Amino acid sequence: MHAFEAGIADVAACAAWAEEAGYDVVASAEVDHDPFLPLALAARDTSRMRLATTIAVAFARTPMTMAYVANDLQALSGGRFVLGLGTQTKPHITRRFGMPWGRPAARMREYVTALRAIWDDWNTGRPVRHEGEHYRHTLMTATFRPAPHGHGNPPIHLAAVGPLMTRLAGEVADGLIPHGFSTERYFREVTLPALEEGLARAGRDRSEVTVHCPGFVHVHAPGDDVDAQRRMLRGRVAFYGSTPAYRGVLDLHGWQELHERLHALSVTPDEDRWDRMADLVDDEVLDTFCVSGSLAEVTAEVSRRFGGLVDQVHIQPPAGTPAPEIRAALASLKNQASGAR
């Protein structure tokens, strides 16, 4: 199970609470904060939970930069760190991060290879000699080589939407993180077959890859304005649905026209464009992409859609949810996830 929603000053206390409540993973995403600092803080007051990025933007950093921070978190946490990586989209990489873009699946394959080559240098002393199309790492001297920490390399989980990146995860990664902009049908008909193809190409078994649950999951707190919460979720679906990189999910459901209308609105200068885009997401579309309701309702629906297919579920109850209620929900989800491998 997976939970993380706290201000930076509250991270350590939140993580300790989550571990006590029975969560298996505390996770940090690269949105409006650095994704690694919260996990360093969480490591201080936890001893059992894994600490994961879901996700860090790979192409915003070189493999060497990523290797150092991941290695430090693995050492700091005593071997509990999980490096979740994603590509982001071209506009963000080139215009927000100011980094190069091109052939994202091929670049990510090389990125993972380079990371492991760097870690191998640090753990074995075998000089790194990675010379690829996108990255070149051929220098490592004793001054800059971290001492082995004895916890091994952190597992690498890859985020994916389309079949190409999903196959890559099956070939080279330790885990698959489907995008939230996904549906039960897309997961069953596109994601899982692509994952199995990647596993077969590499001669690997399904048990070697941790599969995260897809879709948007939102738990309403007692007294919440449910209509307002669903309005927020409509906006989230509209935002991702307007992005050309994600249109394949809508296409599968025959909602090509919805993507075209959302995208056209997203590139207008109109100040109310995001509200107008949310208006285009009807209940059928919303409920296809999202699981929302009380903690018990969400637990039951996630289990119905994805039980036996996934190993890790991302869910966070509202603040103040009684611990026994959380533990019951976690136990139910863990029981469903146990049949995935």
Image: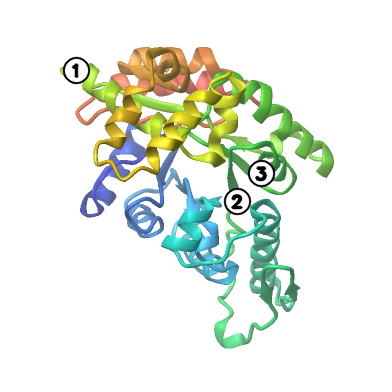
Q: Nearer the viewer, residue 145 or 241?
A: 241
Q: In which quarter of the image is the C terminus?
A: top right
Residue 107 coordinates in the image, percent (x, y):
67, 59
> Which disc is residue 156 wearing?
2
Q: How many labels does the image show?
A: 3
Residue position for label 1: 222
Category of crowding for the residue at label 1, using alpha-carbon neighbours closer than 10 angstroms: few (below 14), some (14–19), many (at least 20) = few
Local SS, label 1: loop
Q: Does residue 313 appear in this view?
A: no
- Taking the spot 64% from the left edge, 67% from the top edge, the residue there is 119
Residue type at mark 3: give it. Met
Q: Mark 2, residues whose alpha carbon is within 10 Å: few (<14), some, or many (≥20)?
A: many
Judging depth in this view, the residue of 23 and 109 nearest the camera is 109
Q: Give the number of the mark in front: 3 or 2.
A: 3
Please tell me in which quadrant of the rendered image residue 235 appears. Answer: top left
Residue 247 against residue 290 in the figure, above or below: below
* Kind of residue sitting beneath label 1: Pro
Q: In this view, does 146 lie to the left or right of 224?
A: right
How far, Cα to Cα, is label 3 from label 2? 14 Å
Quarter holding residue 246: top right
For image coordinates 38% across by 54% down, the residue present is: 39
As helix, strand or loop, the secondary structure at mark 3 comes to helix
Q: Are marks 3 and 2 in contact (CB under 8 Å)?
A: no
Q: Distance between the residues labelled 1 and 2?
A: 37 Å
Q: How far apart are marks 3 and 1 (CA)?
A: 39 Å
Q: Does residue 250 show up?
A: yes
Sequence-first tag of 3 and 2: 2
Q: Residue 165, labelled with which disc?
A: 3
